[in-house]
Amino acid sequence: MMRGSRLGSRFYALAAMAAVGLAATVKTDAYVANILMQAATYAIAVFGLSIVLGLCGQINLAQAAFFAIGAYSVALGTVDYHLPFWPCLILGMAVAFAAGAGLGLSTLRLGGHYLAMVTISFQQILTVVLINAIGVTHGPDGVGSIGRPAGFASSQSFLALAVAIMAASGYFVWRLSHSRLGRAMRAVRDNELAASAVGIDVFGAKWLAFALCALLGGLGGGLFAGGFSYVSPDQFAFSDSIVLLTMALLGGVASPVGSAIGTGLLILIPEWLRFLKSVPGLYLAIYGAAVILIVIFMPDGIWGFVGRLLRPRPREATEPAEPLVLRPADSGADIVMEVAGLSKHFGGLKAVDGVGFTVRRGEVHALIGPNGSGKTTTLNVVTGLYRATRGAVIVDGVDVTALAPHKRCIAGLARTFQNIRLFRSMSALENVVIGAEREGNALVTGGHDALERRARSALAFVGLDARRHETIPSFSYGHQRLIEIARALAANPTVLLLDEPAAGLNSSEKKALHDLLDRIAAQGLTILIIDHDMTLIAGVAKRLTVLNFGKRIADGETADVLREPDVVTAYLGAS
Amino acid sequence: MEFFLQLLFNGIGIGAVYALVALGFVLIFRATSVVNFAQGEFSMVAAYLMVVFAVDLDLPYWLAFGIALGGMALLGAIFNLLVYYPLRNRSYLPVLISTIGASIFLSNSVLALYGPQPQVLPGWLDIPGFQLGPVYLDSQYLIIIGVTLALVAFQYWLFERTLLGKKLQATSQDKEMAALLGIPVALMIMFTFVYSAVLGGIAGILVAPVLFVSIQMGSTIALKAFAATIIGGFGDVAGAIIGGFAIGVIETFGAAYISVPFKDAFAFLVLILFLVLRPQGIFGERVAEKA
């Protein structure tokens, strides 16, 4: 993995230097130079979209507006205020970043539709401002004679500069997708709830993706202004945001290579089909239809399609996985988790009503009760997916009641879900690496290699190391459950919470699960388990808490609790 | 005071159009969990159909109206088949992008066919309007308000009092269960698109005599209608209607008392304010995703 990416980096650096060298030396006529200039600066903006849309699964329909912010910053700064090029460019990027961050702050918590409409609104408002605030922006006439940086005054040298910056931005986006932050963004894209449960700040990841996208838009725009020496509002309209989006989708939104391909094609094709521009609208109508066709027939874009054919097969394991070590954090206290007076009301429904129990260190504790008794709701309040109406949750001496879900994971809670929540576009290994990446996981020291070693031992622990490079959909339901457990184990949590792990498993899978839970418990990891399978519960759990209609009706050692009349009644009905 | 009442009347009139388009948004959203970004283009296309049949071909207004609405029903059906249906099992993002593509396609196809000059569509009545005390009641605004109220009443009857309405509601609440009960879900969704396209079309035809008929009219109306749905509480029918009226009144007053060139910015400002302060809208409740 590491060697492969180093090889890739070296190849990339060579290709980039060749491109910059060609741009700097080969004489082209002004027409070709303009096309190349446009392609290089647009590509930077499209890289931004590949972060927000490709990595993080969010939408931005205002990339042309962020592009405009960078362009106008350079234009107005160098022309009206006689500032040098570089400070203007940096200012433009900063303003674009701030605008993206501000839009993201107000909207990202609400999900995609809001973001789409708000970015369209922002785009249109910015166009209104560029046209009407004539005193500042020169209005519809635009700004001409825009300055270039010292040393890059000729068109040819500035083009070489733009190509170099494009190559650097592309490298940044490429590396980003394999970094911790990039993995977090992809996890958010695949499954937000699961991402928050493995310790990822979902809102933070989206916010940063959006702001970085805006920043790259500003960078591209600033270079565009320098390259063409003239900007006007109609160059940065909503339709241009759509053009940028189409470029990203066509090439393949998951990778900067795809972005570059899409940008190149959509700049060249219209030049070849110039006659289409003689009928206003026709050209964009074709873009609109192309967007629908790409989304339906080529969801991963051209590069996604080609890349699947070219992708190298992962090399076979050279060494076997190391045995999994679990060393849960230990404050020394006997009680590792305390739930006190916990209530969760949905309107008038008291789904959980004053439930309290304590989980002792190193024990397997089960939460049982009939359907609708509030078990999963309790677990969701404990892990922070729901906010408690009343009550407190204390993990290893730390009150986590007010914390966000990802903070609780960092505090030591790891969980699985009743309906499996894995990152479905990723391999089993990547899923578990994300688990191992939990902030505060003392067992992973060192770089990516250490993470992968940890993830492999967790996968080996559940018996799936050999299939680690396969993506999630190729695993059976039972194996997906095991991967979810491996993801939680890799994090080296203080308490492992399992929500109906036996649901949907056949009898041999259940036996294997029972054995797995025993092996986990043998390493001293505390488990809180919810399940309906009483054979499993009676076999693994030392203690039981029984819920019915949101209230606790029994609590104590397993054998005693199962004999209590209230519990028998709740399960079998009043006799 | 006279000026105030006059603005209030005009605001309610334009707000009724936003309410109709917002209603189209909400119906499709409830049936498919998708926001249709081409909803505004339905209004634009219908207005152009009216220009073609009522002005260019000089057909009687009622006949042109009927043809235009028939065209919209057909467009809604085609839209459902080509833009939504192939993506119905994917996540919201591809569908959303697909409807954006459709929006670009529709507006620019009309541009290619009809050119960039804004067109004029006369109002339904020859009487321009009349004076009622201090307020001048424009006849087209009266028609807009009247038709909107009638359509709201019709929709209430349709959804609450007919079997078709119950089936539509069942489809929007739980597609799988509805299918198991023998409700033809695909047909219900088809009907929703057709109905929403007609609704958007009526809004476009009603507002056309007040504004110019232009390529941009669709996206402008859609933006405001979307703001209306957020103010009312996303997915809430009554909220969309009240939100539509609210946006109409707010932007009319904003344009009169603050700034005309920035008229279109007021809806956006209100939208941002709601998103920050009360994202669930006036009527909406926060719902958590089930783990």
Image (spheres, helix red, strand yellow):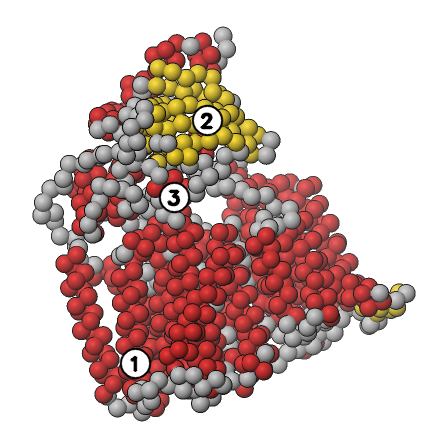
Looking at the image, residue B122 lies above or below residue B275: below
Q: Secondary structure at mark 2?
A: strand
Residue receiving disc 1: A161
Q: Amino acid at mark 2?
A: Ala
How crowded pointer 1 is (Cα within 10 Å; few <14, some 14-19, many 20+) is rated as some
Q: Spatial distance from mark 3 to mark 2, Cα to Cα?
A: 21 Å
Locate the N terminus of chain A and report the quarter of the image it occupies. bottom left
Q: Amino acid at mark 1?
A: Leu
Q: In the rendered view, does B129 fall on the left or right side of A361?
A: right
Q: In the rendered view, does B221 fall on the left or right side of A476?
A: right
Q: Amino acid at mark 3?
A: His
Q: Spatial distance from mark 2 to mark 1, Cα to Cα?
A: 62 Å
Specify the label residue A340 is tagged with.
2
Q: Secondary structure at mark 3?
A: helix
Which-is-in-front pick, marks 2 and 1?
A: 2
Q: Position of residue B213 (x, y in %)?
A: 65, 73
Specify the label residue A406 is tagged with.
3
Residue reaching furthest right?
Answer: B133
